[in-house]
Image (cartoon, rainbow, N blue to C red):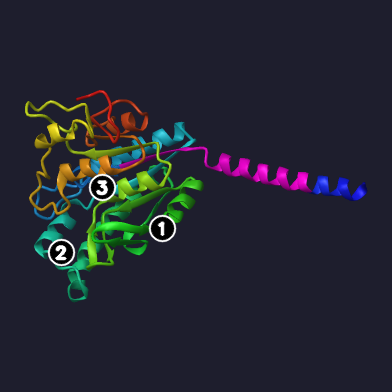
Amino acid sequence: MIKKTSLFIFFTQIIFSFYANAQTKTEIKQYLISIIKLGGSVITNKEKKFGSTRYDTIITICKEISEFLSKHPHHRIIVVTGGGGLAHAIAKEYDLKTKLDSENMDDIWKCHDSVKELNSLIVEMLNLSGVPAFPIHPSSCTVCCNKKIKTMDIDIISQLLDNNVVPVLHGDIVLDTKQCMCILSGDQIVAYLGTTLCVDRIGLASIEDGILDETGTVIPEINQKNFDLVKKHIGGSSCKSDVTGGMLKKVEELLGAQKPKLSCIFNGAKKGCVTQFLMGEPIGTTIVNTVSTYS
């Protein structure tokens, strides 16, 4: 009888311990995640040959992120930065879309260094605004296969989020199993993280108010049902040096993401728009990867 009682107590303790640990893990993960992509056209002037940094816009965005996080402690944010005018100009000048191999390493390094420098600036401005932020360089944790992400170490990102630190990634040049290396856009990174992490919402901060129709009016929603109808209105990038596909590629990446169900493209250069997005308020063009009501 004593042995049976001891066994019962033993198994009860194991079950209770497992339940308690599960509860602790659930509590740790009880936060909402938003991904915000700061497009190169927002944080730099891509119209200039080698770009120029929009410091005022960057400072404003970082302050808005800081104010939001201070009022919403159960939220976490992942920031992804675009390549900016300098990186795209270098990539085009040295034809890095087609010449990515060991013989071209000097030019590859120049391109990587430019995106890393811009990324470092965003990290610095976030920290100065009171937001703990840390850089993650995709070139060190990502492998592609035929220009699509094959593996990315998301444990690094999860660990930073658990410790209330904002991971800051960027478009980059990464290893590719089919062609040595490839250009990995920030848009693809955003879509990949949206699928692999429990992301609440994705926002692409552009220089435009959203996707515009033929009259210049913002299209409120794009989904799988109406994509073919509105596709003709979605152009590439207005910047001639852009090597990652522009607005159309952004929409295609978001439509291909499995999570979250809703994403949006909005004007990140306008004061208050980043806050509006983080608050979950309607803004710009909503991208829905399941059929909704708008057609």
SS at circle 1 = loop
| Mark 2 and mark 3 residues within 8 Å of each other at the beta carbon | no
Residue located at (19% from left, 47% from top): 44
Which amino acid type corresponds to the residue marked 2 in the rendered image? Leu
Task: Classify 10 Å Cα crowding around label 2: few (below 14), some (14-19), many (20 and above).
Answer: many
Q: Position of residue 247 (x, y in %)?
A: 16, 42
Mark 2 or mark 1, earlier in chain: 2
Magenta part of the protein: which range?
11-36
Magenta stretch: residue 30 in it?
yes
Residue 286 shows which numbered tag? none
Disc 2 from disc 3: Cα separation: 18 Å
Which amino acid type corresponds to the residue marked 1 in the rendered image? Asp
Q: Position of residue 106 (x, y in %)?
A: 19, 72
Mark 2 or mark 3, earlier in chain: 2
Magenta stretch: residue 194 in it?
no
Please state which of residues 211 and 41 is positioned toward the viewer in this rendering: 211
Disc 1 from disc 3: Cα separation: 17 Å
Q: Does the magenta stretch mainly form a helix, a strand or a loop? A: helix
Please state which of residues 242 and 181 is positioned toward the viewer in this rendering: 181
Disc 2 from disc 1: Cα separation: 25 Å
- Residue marked by disc 2: 96
- Residue marked by disc 3: 187
Q: Position of residue 181 (x, y in %)?
A: 24, 66
Residue located at (17% from left, 28% from top): 219
- Residue marked by disc 1: 153
Which amino acid type corresponds to the residue marked 3 in the rendered image? Asp
Mark 1 or mark 3, earlier in chain: 1
Q: Position of residue 263 (x, y in %)?
A: 30, 35
Task: Classify 10 Å Cα crowding around label 1: few (below 14), some (14-19), many (20 and above).
Answer: few
Task: Classify 10 Å Cα crowding around label 3: few (below 14), some (14-19), many (20 and above).
Answer: many
